[in-house]
Structures are given as structure tokens and as C-alpha cells.
Image (spheres, rainbow, N blue to C red):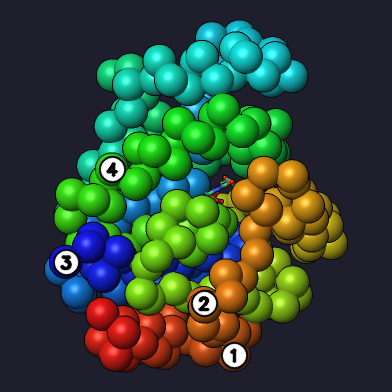
Amino acid sequence: MSSATKIIAIDGPVGTGKSTVAKEVARRMGFAFLDTGAMYRAATWRALHLGLSLDDAPALAESTRAMKLEICENENGQQVLVDGHDVTDAIRTPEITKLIYKLDQEPAVRRHLVALQQSFGEMQPTVAEGRDIGTVVFPKAKCKIYLDASVDVRAERRALQMEEKGMTVDRDQLKADIADRDHKSMTRADSPLRQAEDAILVDTSHLTIEEVVERLLSLARERL
Ligand code: DC
């Protein structure tokens, strides 16, 4: 049996609840969880940490290939180590979020990270989430889901998350940032964000996390 039968591929733009939902589906199915965004974040952190120019494509590729990346999921959540440094929080800063697009459009960077993601999926049943999982990383996956929601709903969710952390939020700015990230992900030349032809669209705008999880679990059971 090919490992493609044991992959649940979840794609979609920022703020659709992808990570939360993917993690919970993985837990309930007993599958491993692969957060591919964390890998692009880690590679961006490393390049900045080394003082590389994010416009220097060969240096970015070289740095990504040399990166020693460890991602562990445990009861306290996810821990990300780059070359032994704990960067769990550092890769989630607004600065990194804003600059990732410089690195995630580099084909050599993507090739390397995609190969790592594929070998992870070969080793165990996996729920993988990102932007190109159903189109590029696991095109043969039997269960592909594309999560979407309106920009207004996604911005509001993100605002509430930030406010919970005590941050002050400019909602108009947040909405503009999300629309800008959508545009960059969807229009890049290499592996743009799009729904795979055989992916099922789930609009999460008016669904709770639990409703989305239930829907994905029933799709996964039907298809795998
Ligand atoms: O899911 P996230 O916000 O942590 O992802 C961070 C960035 O990484 C996102 O802006 C686009 C990029 N990314 C990508 O290009 N391909 C993936 N498979 C996952 C993320």
C-alpha cells in the first residue's frame, strides 16, 4: 500500500483554522501532524539570524539545506529547534511572518523543504497542512481538503487570538495584511496556493472548530 493512502492533506490561506483543526484531526486519527508553515518560518528565522540578505537566493537555499531542524509535538504543544536553538516563539513574530514570502518563493528552498516533508509522510500516517500539500507535496493523497473563509472572518479570528495574548490590534491593518499575504501566496510562480482539483472545499466561515474537525474526520474515514 502506498503511503499516499495514509495522508490527509490540508491547504488553505491564513486564518482558516488549519493548524488547530489539522492537529486535532491528527490526534483523533492517531496520525502524525506536519506543520509545513513552521518549516518555512524556521528557515526564515535562520537566514535572519545569520544576517543573510533575503534577496540572496543562493544563500537562502544554502542556509535552508544546512539547517538542522527538529520539530517535536508533545503534550505542551509544538517545540521547534533550529541548530539546537529553541525558536518556538521566535518563528511566530510579526517580523518573521512579514518576511517569509521572500524565502517561500525560492524554488531551491521549496525543493529542499518539500523533500523533507515527503520523507516524513513516507514514514508514518500523517496529517500535513500548508499551502501546497495537495498540489505539490502529496499530489497522490486520497484525502485532500481545502479550507477557506472570508477575509473578514479570518481577520476577526486573528484579532481575537492576538487580543487574548494582550496585544492591541488595528483591525483594518490586520485585514490588509491578510489580504496581502493571500495575494503573495496565490500569485507566486512556484507552488502558488490553490485548491487541488480533487480537494474538497470546506468553508469554515460559519463553522466552529469542532464542526470542521468532525467534517474532516468523516471525509478522512470515507476516503482512506
Ligand atoms: O501556515 P503559516 O502561516 O505558519 O505559514 C507561514 C508562511 O509559509 C505562509 O505565509 C506561506 C508559507 N508556506 C508555504 O509557502 N508553503 C507551505 N506549505 C506552508 C507555508
Kindly check if marks 1 and 3 are in contact, taking CB atoms under 8 A apart as contact.
no
Q: Which mark is residue 36?
A: none
Q: Nearer the viewer, residue 211 or 141?
A: 141
* Residue 148, percent from left and from top: 62, 76
Q: Identify which residue is drawn at 23% across, 42% down.
A: 72
Residue underneath mark 4: 119
The quarter in which the C terminus is drawn is bottom left
Q: Which residue is mark 3?
A: 1
- N-terminal of the pair, mark 4 or mark 2, is 4
Distance between mark 4 and mark 2 Cα atoms: 22 Å
**Residue at the (28%, 32%) spot, across then down:** 70
Kind of residue indicated by mark 4: Ser
Q: Amino acid at mark 2?
A: Ala
- Per the model, the C-alpha gap separating discs 3 and 2 is 21 Å
The amino acid pointed to by label 3 is Met
Task: Single out the mark in the foreground, 3 or 4.
Answer: 3
Mark closest to the chain's N terminus, 1 or 2: 2
Q: Confirm if mark 3 falls within 8 A of ligand 1.
A: no
Residue marked by disc 1? 206
Q: Is residue 191 left or right of residue 202?
A: right
Name the mark on residue 199.
2
Rendered location of residue 167, percent (x, y)? 62, 51
Q: Separation of disc 1 and disc 3 at Cα?
A: 37 Å
Residue 163, can we see it?
no
Q: Secondary structure at mark 3?
A: loop
Instruction: Name the spot of residue 105 as percent of width and height, x first.
Output: 67, 37
Please tell me how crowded label 3 is: few (under 14), some (14-19), or many (20+) other residues with Cα within 10 Å: few
